[in-house]
Amino acid sequence: MSWFNILAGSVASGGGGGHATAPAFVAATSVDAETSSTLNCTTSISAGETVIVSVGLFLSGGSVSSVIGGGTYTKIASLANPEDGRLVNELWACLSASSSASTVTVTLSGAANSSATVARYTGVSSFGNNGTASNSAGVYSDTTHSISLTMQDTNNRIVSAGIVRPETTATATVGSFRANAPEFNHGSFDSNLIDNMSSSAGSLAATYTTSAGVLWNAVAVELRSNP
């Protein structure tokens, strides 16, 4: 196995320590599209929920231009694979939805084979650390794919969006598998969403495996608990 974290940062933070109520997973839905610049993902967002949107695409220089639906979204992290820069995934989030929404619309920088997952959580006070991980350049043999973040409080949750090429079904080995979004129409890649929670502060991983060696990315964010 060869993997590494290549970014660690913080989007927003609150006070440390003493947090008790853990962020809770509500539901996740996914959508895919072939050679399109727009993804419309059906969902059921309620006001006040935290919404995590993971996007995978196969496009050189590709990126997400905007995410709309239920509130204001911020890009948390993004990564183009170091071996094949066409393999890109991004993580966007809305801390507290201002209104209900039945659709989240993702606009890309250009037409691409793509997929998106919309995951909803409650009990999130703020976004904490974020990071990315991937195979090393020139490595195609990885079958275990893991990312770790430092949880700043008790009962925080890591949410990780993964993407693999070629399309290969992933299995969560550390954490809970919440969604799988293969790019069905073209078979460019397979994307997934995994989360994990810890009752103590410190390093926390989200890990998935594949049955064969692949190129892979993971982008993740810490959901901080309510005191």
Image: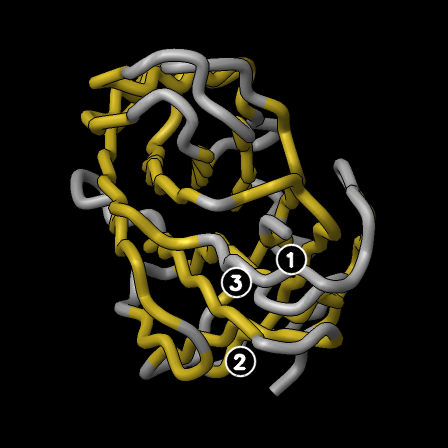
- How busy is the neighbourhood of tag 2: few (under 14 within 10 Å), some, or many (20 plus)? many
Check disc 3 and report the residue beneath it.
216
Residue at the location (22% across, 28% down)? 43
Q: Which residue is located at x 54 percent, y 14 percent?
A: 72
Marks counted in the figure total 3
- Of marks 2 and 1, the one in the foreground: 2
Amino acid at the residue labelled 2: Asp
Q: Amino acid at mark 1?
A: Glu
Q: Is residue 46 left or right of residue 11?
A: left
Q: Quadrant of the N terminus?
A: bottom right
Instruction: Give whichever of discs 1 and 3 has the lower sequence position.
Output: 1
Label 2 and label 3: CA atoms lie apart by 8 Å
Q: Position of residue 135 (x, y in %)?
A: 63, 69
Mark nearer the N terminus (2 vs 1): 1
Task: List the residue tagged with mark 1.
Answer: 83
**Residue at numbered disc 2:** 142
